[in-house]
Image (cartoon, helix red, strand yellow):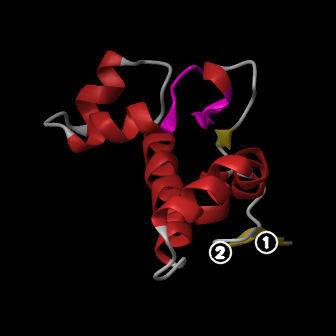
Amino acid sequence: MSNVELLSRITVDAEVCHGKPCVRGLRYPVEFLLELLSSDMTTEQILADYPDLEAEDLKAACAYGARLSQILVSTGNNSNVALSRVFATNLPALLTALSSHDFVELSVSAITIHA
């Protein structure tokens, strides 16, 4: 499954988990899945404990985390306070862009979304 296909499994809905990125509209936030994956649990154990998840869902959570870290790392040496303000102010647009696979450029003054 390609990265684009994996990322398409991540959904953002204000009515599900307070708008946090989740897998396939289910109530499994990406952050929760990443925490499980970073613990001592194996993929097989996670899938056994959460039977409505698929192996691709866990890969999708990793792909989403990687994509988000690419955005945050590309911000360079900007002030963390200013960056936090921009990020918080533009979070809905950022999440929409991530879920639609757009390229997102983040600076201390704006978030630019490239289709």
Q: In which quarter of the image is the C terminus?
A: bottom right
Q: What element carries label 1?
A: strand
Q: Could you tell me residue 84's position as x and y percent?
A: 55, 56
Residue that numbered label 2 is attached to: 107
Magenta: predominant secondary structure element? loop
Please state which of residues 113 and 6 is positioned toward the viewer in this rendering: 113
- Residue at image location 43% in from the left, 40% down from the top: 55
Please check the rendered image and state whether residue 100 is part of the magenta-colored stretch, yes or no. no
Q: What element carries label 2?
A: loop
Can you say whether 18 is above or below 103 in the image? above
Can you say whether 41 is above or below 60 in the image? above
Asked whether the residues under the numbered discs 2 and 1 touch, taking CB atoms below 8 Å apart as contact, a structural biologist would say yes
- Residue at image location 29% in from the left, 33% down from the top: 36
Q: Quadrant of residue 109?
A: bottom right
Q: Could you tell me residue 12's position as x and y percent?
A: 71, 36
- Is residue 44 visible in this depiction of the protein? yes
In the image, 98: left or right of 51?
right
Q: Quadrant of residue 43?
A: top left
Residue that numbered label 1 is attached to: 112
